[in-house]
Image: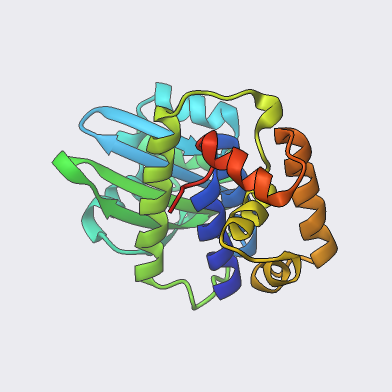
Amino acid sequence: MDGEFRSLVDMLEVAQDEAMIKGALRQFTRSCGYERFAYLEKEGAQIRTFNSYPKPWEGLYLSADYSSIDPVVTEAKRKRDVFFWTAEDWPARGSSPLRKFRDEAIDHGIRCGMTIPVEGGYGASMMLTFASSEREVDVPAAFDSRRAVQLVMMVHYRLKMIAAKTAINPKQVLSPREMLCLTWAMKGKNTLETAAVTGINSRTVQHYLDKARAKLGAESVPQLVGIAKDRGLLSSN
């Protein structure tokens, strides 16, 4: 789990658009044994979400204002700590809105999960959920509360930064792995050193750097780093 978490942090750090964030989170979600993730920010009646849930479920959730009765959201406000949940504990009988919510969640493949709640500023609350269609998922013990909060805050601020950026030519958008290798190159690592740090085969590292050079029109790795900095793809620090 240490390696997966470190890789996720690195990839979030270099993410240049929402697709890159989503790809990194999907990969981490699978490594935790879950199938889907959902980041949700709630400030008063306003809801913002970023997730890999089925689109029909996302539309239904927002249109039906399910956040007001969602047991996961309710528990997140109460606990303020990592917690696990299962739809099996929600009402299974009767005709209440909560029973309907339970049935529809299960129908869309959301049956159990882990949620990380974080209190934001000005009364806002944020949470990151990993969900599965299974009744139960074994979660790696190394996923502690400190790392969990760090993860939510990274997702939160990365999404805010990307939303504020000017869009660039889609053909010049680097993949998460290309950005990862480029970032280590900026830090002075050669191909073999980057391979050792990231766990990626050295030939594959070179392949990612070559693809990044082609996209940005660079003839060498130092020039690639310079172009990426000039275009705001890399921090100068």
Foreground of the two, 40 or 158: 158
Quadrant in the picture for the C terminus: bottom left
Where in the figure is residue 110, as x and y percent of width and height? 55, 46
Residue 203 position, x and y percent, is: 85, 62
Q: Is residue 169 left or right of residue 62?
A: right
Q: Residue 70 lies in what quarter of the image?
A: top left
At 20% across and 32% down in the image, what residue appears? 44
Whether residue 208 is visible: yes
Question: Outermost residue toward the left?
Answer: 122
Measured as percent of width and height from the top left, residue 201 is found at 80, 66
Residue lying at 24% horizontally and 28% vertically, measured from the top left? 45
Of residues 236 and 162, the one drawn nearer to the viewer in this rendering: 236
Task: Report whether 203 appears left or right of 93.
Answer: right
Name the spot of residue 114 as percent of width and height, x first. Answer: 45, 59
- Tell which of 81 and 136 is nearer to you: 81
Q: Is residue 100 visible?
A: no
Q: Quadrant of the N terminus?
A: bottom right
Q: Is residue 46 left or right of residue 85?
A: left
Query: Which coloring applies here?
Result: rainbow
Q: Residue at x 75, y 50 (%)?
A: 209
